[in-house]
Amino acid sequence: MEASTRRSFGSDNNAPVAPEILQAIVDANEGDAVGYGDDPWTARAVARFKEHFGNSTGVYLTFNGTGANVAALSSLLRPWEAVLAPASAHLQTDECGALERFAGSKVIPIATSDGKLRPSDIEPYLLAGHGVHFPQPRAISISQAPEFGGVYELDEVRTLCTFAHAENLIVHMDGARLSNAAVALGATLCEASADLGVDILSFGGTKNGLMLGEAVCFFKPELSGDSAPYVRKQSMQLASKMRYLAAQFDALLSENRWSRYAAHANAMAQLLYQRVKDIPGVRVTRSVRCNAVFATLDRRAIEAIQREFFFYVFDEALPEVRWMTHWATTEQDVEEFAACIGRAVTEQ
Amino acid sequence: MEASTRRSFGSDNNAPVAPEILQAIVDANEGDAVGYGDDPWTARAVARFKEHFGNSTGVYLTFNGTGANVAALSSLLRPWEAVLAPASAHLQTDECGALERFAGSKVIPIATSDGKLRPSDIEPYLLAGHGVHFPQPRAISISQAPEFGGVYELDEVRTLCTFAHAENLIVHMDGARLSNAAVALGATLCEASADLGVDILSFGGTKNGLMLGEAVCFFKPELSGDSAPYVRKQSMQLASKMRYLAAQFDALLSENRWSRYAAHANAMAQLLYQRVKDIPGVRVTRSVRCNAVFATLDRRAIEAIQREFFFYVFDEALPEVRWMTHWATTEQDVEEFAACIGRAVTEQ
Amino acid sequence: MEASTRRSFGSDNNAPVAPEILQAIVDANEGDAVGYGDDPWTARAVARFKEHFGNSTGVYLTFNGTGANVAALSSLLRPWEAVLAPASAHLQTDECGALERFAGSKVIPIATSDGKLRPSDIEPYLLAGHGVHFPQPRAISISQAPEFGGVYELDEVRTLCTFAHAENLIVHMDGARLSNAAVALGATLCEASADLGVDILSFGGTKNGLMLGEAVCFFKPELSGDSAPYVRKQSMQLASKMRYLAAQFDALLSENRWSRYAAHANAMAQLLYQRVKDIPGVRVTRSVRCNAVFATLDRRAIEAIQREFFFYVFDEALPEVRWMTHWATTEQDVEEFAACIGRAVTEQ
Amino acid sequence: MEASTRRSFGSDNNAPVAPEILQAIVDANEGDAVGYGDDPWTARAVARFKEHFGNSTGVYLTFNGTGANVAALSSLLRPWEAVLAPASAHLQTDECGALERFAGSKVIPIATSDGKLRPSDIEPYLLAGHGVHFPQPRAISISQAPEFGGVYELDEVRTLCTFAHAENLIVHMDGARLSNAAVALGATLCEASADLGVDILSFGGTKNGLMLGEAVCFFKPELSGDSAPYVRKQSMQLASKMRYLAAQFDALLSENRWSRYAAHANAMAQLLYQRVKDIPGVRVTRSVRCNAVFATLDRRAIEAIQREFFFYVFDEALPEVRWMTHWATTEQDVEEFAACIGRAVTEQ
């Protein structure tokens, strides 16, 4: 079977585009439209964001998640200001140093057991001294859902934001999977972000049914001054045919689609968890709250499973794997995958 | 009439997506696919590029034209090396300094009358001296078609490439409208670029019928060493759901579509030229070879026309306007536009 | 005669250190001193600057002129903001693109006949449009004295500052030779800079008798917010043993030394001008106001003179040479140099 | 007593300039010299470096240690390549993110107990995977002597270099205190660096008796291609009056001065160690091999001592202090300092 067409538990970005999203693209394909966002689709998408997050929200659509994170943070940080992030953050591990190169700012990685930052993790960096010799911590970046599975509870984010603001730190949320987290928490998107004190959000579309597109949301637009439009352009994230990004977000944020797609993905992860948790030889290593299941199992079993399904080994040393579900994962996919896992561990 | 839905002669990026391209996207929306280009659609798109440009071509799809230019040049330039470009180049005027910020390299703008570089424009910069005190010119960037209308003749590009290589300079072609130029020149894409000695090409899709997508083509991949994949990622231009970019390029480069779309756009510009060239009060200022018509006319006439059609004033001082056609411009659009122009200049 | 020990009319940075400056260094070499500027010598130097430029002046010593210009402008510009400068500016031609690389900001070079900017040179760039697509002009950088000889009259700078501020532009003065210009204008340092509306000054020491050292002076410190200390450090311009830079500036700005050194250098240029202006075959090309004489003469004559004296050919095409004098140039040096020039042009 | 004139055990950069070094500066102050290093003093300094490190060594003088580290690494790293360093490295903690801003490259900080890297610290980063999504580790930066006291044994550096080269990693040594380390190890400068496999060295002058000046030494100049001269200029580290940096290094590297100064500093640290190690209430926390003594003691005792002597608290939490000696520290200074410490801990 060709690698690229195997059913994938590799990432939610391996999924196709949700049909309603694709239809929105097709519907937008009518006549001319002025470029760079001066079009009715973008106006509608921005209005949707404001419905969800409040009327003062500043919204900037970008191409991808790395672009969203970099555009968001670069709008706020001066190059001698640093951002504190878990060592596991996408910003630190999967953006090829884009922030450092584009913004000049240092990302300070903080070791955590679960990919979640707490005030006690941050305190030492505020006492570090060094005066002008060390970049000044100015922002905290947290991922909701975290890259290591689980989820920040609402109170955890609220506590962190309160702490951060007391220390004059800005809170950025990498919400590539905010929809999954909000569903897991039984919260609206706003309750899971702006309402808790988050200052800037990278809101993910690609991993929740879109073809491509992320959105930078400034909940306190004054923080970025007039930077954001220029930074988006200079960071190569300004689409000329913006309507095709905008139409997707308009659809995603309408008729509760963001929630339905995420809820399905989360449910499929729960189903997978139920099916594998008692398989001898499989040890689920992290709490399953959103759409990822982490587990350790025998290396030969992994290889056997990978001949049928695509997924990533997250930590080669253990080895620990990550299995992700998405809006289009079916119950049958999960059952067949779980069966394959069961066979593989038994046969080793 | 709402600004954004007026018929547009503003830019070829105001056009919708060509139906065959949109269909290719819809067709690609089937099942899971591994992200970041490890999928069969990307493999097919790369194969198409190699059919057109030769088997050793290195191909990297990006989101937009600024991203393509920056990724292309950043793969080759060290930060103390400079790129020589016409003062009118998109790289200089419309990328918000993205290359300077991302690559650190200086763009040296050269004044030209027509947006085209010639060896005599470049020579003074090679004699400039200053040793380590001035960035070393390492690349030339030319736009085909140029931003100021017209086209480089094949011999002009060949002469420039020969000159550049003799001076150890790399030639980058910003081919956002290479298809239009190739059609105008009666050449294949390869005859209009690689065959003339061009070293790297930013090949445009967005302005020729795609939803989004440009491609960086390295004709001498050894020039970029192993940089290109990392630079694309670090420059925030690596799509996760790559198949949707790739499928578009696969379609564009198949069945001569690139040529048909461009030929239509060029023909519409010629038709417009024929209709307006003898209107008293309209002076066509530049040769019409691809899909742009430049003209000077009375400021009040411009404003009157803009109430019905969208387009840009290119030089406010004269004023000089730019009227662009695209794959979807119809003869009726042109006739109505020309009639509107005729009325507007008469009424002033 | 060894190239490096020939008497030099090449640059005022070919001069030795003035004896009173060297003595100040020797005097500072007593006991321990806390690093990075927290020492009494730095306190005294800063007090001297405030005596000259006013009590609210923010002062940051740097190692060299490129460092001063970059630290000054980087404290004020965001990376999507541009600086307008004459094409002849040191910032553009002799800093190897340091600003672009460090700050990300674009330097927009403006062609001038004499190295001096006027409002009419700047106006087109303020009308350029392009919205977010072009870096926003935010600062003007002028060199006093200009690199092409002559001097800005006080009214010229005042007019430019008034114009700039009306357009919300900051005025940076590269004052590597401000002392020479102030003397030529019969003005104090403050009358020749801050009093005219200049916002930031790179004040030169190295070319007026110091071993090394320049100073960034913020006349409106609020413009840089809290950036300056961090930017100086991050730009690698913060000296640990600061007292040795500070002691030099304390001496230079005391007992009128800055003026005496500069006045001598200027007088030597005037003497040279008087001696060469009537030599057939030598054409002085630019007004001699400070310490530079520009002239065109026969290429073989240039080569003959260079066998005895060191200087630079400024424009190889003409060729045009630049002869510079400095605090230590003697009348005898000038007489012998002029005699050598006379012989050389006669013998060709 | 004024803070800045207290005797300092704060840093070796609080010391004055050694008399023989100052004399070398005074001696260089004779007549004109061509700028930027084309002078006989620079030629002699380079020759001295080659005597010490071998004839193929590429030598670039810079202003300060941050400049040396950034120029060294920027000459070798592409912006998508990363450098691995201990979390305690000056590069990580005391350069205000200069490398990130100037080079774009990520510094990956590695937690260590003693500021020393071992192959086992590095291995996990070579297995991290992430493909193009993570910057590629390309260099290791080690500090000799380490910032946390102690010293790398010769074998430790050799083992690390062998490991690094097998992994295609370059080894950079931040040798701000290499002289102290070499003396402690009974090795020549070359035996303690190039002979062990180190590829690039930042050789420190400022902390061993110079007024200012560091030197980047490329032991395999081919690694940097033709970058180094341009990078030094673009990083704002090229002195115009280079002779005054060069003369200092010529003197330092002659007549064994580098060794004598460092040996004295080390001996004073040993003396201090002997005097304080048995004081009840003072716990020396790290091995004393070069010119630093680390200790924990009561916070009120620290404050009492700081009223008479200047030094830094290195870790506020414990608290742990760092006491440094230098070429000019006298036995009497040490005795009085130790006596003061004794009194302070007794009185609490």
Image (cartoon, coloured by chain):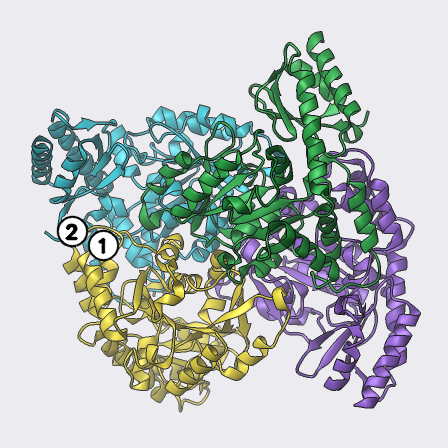
Chain colours: A cyan, B yellow, C purple, D green
Q: Amino acid at mark 1?
A: Asp
Against A16, residue C294 (above or below) is: below
Q: Amino acid at mark 2?
A: Ala
Against D191, residue B328 (above or below) is: below
Using residue C330 as the reference point, say whether residue C149 is left or right of it.
left
Whole-angstrom CA distance, mark 1 to mark 2, is 8 Å
Tell me the element at label 2: helix
Q: Quadrant of the C terminus of chain A?
A: top left
- Is residue C99 in view from this perspective? no
Using residue B4 as the reference point, say whether residue C43 is left or right of it.
right
Determine the image quadrant of residue C205.
bottom right
Tell me the element at label 1: loop
Against B270, residue C97 (above or below) is: above
Chain for disc number 2: A
Q: Nearer the viewer, residue B177 or C344?
A: C344
Against D320, residue C108 (above or below) is: below
Q: How many C-alpha atoms fall within 10 Å of the one at disc 1: few (<14), some, or many (≥20)?
A: some
Q: Which mark is residue A285?
A: none
Q: Nearer the viewer, residue C121 or C319?
A: C319
Q: Position of residue D42 (x, y in %)?
A: 71, 58
Q: Are marks 1 and 2 on the same chain?
A: no
Q: Nearer the viewer, residue C339 or C316?
A: C339
Q: Position of residue B87 (x, y in %)?
A: 52, 73
Q: Position of residue A270 (x, y in %)?
A: 17, 30
Determine the residue located farthest toward the top in the rendered image.
D347
Tag 1–tag 2 contact (CB < 8 Å): yes
Residue under pointer 2: A3
Residue under pointer 1: B38
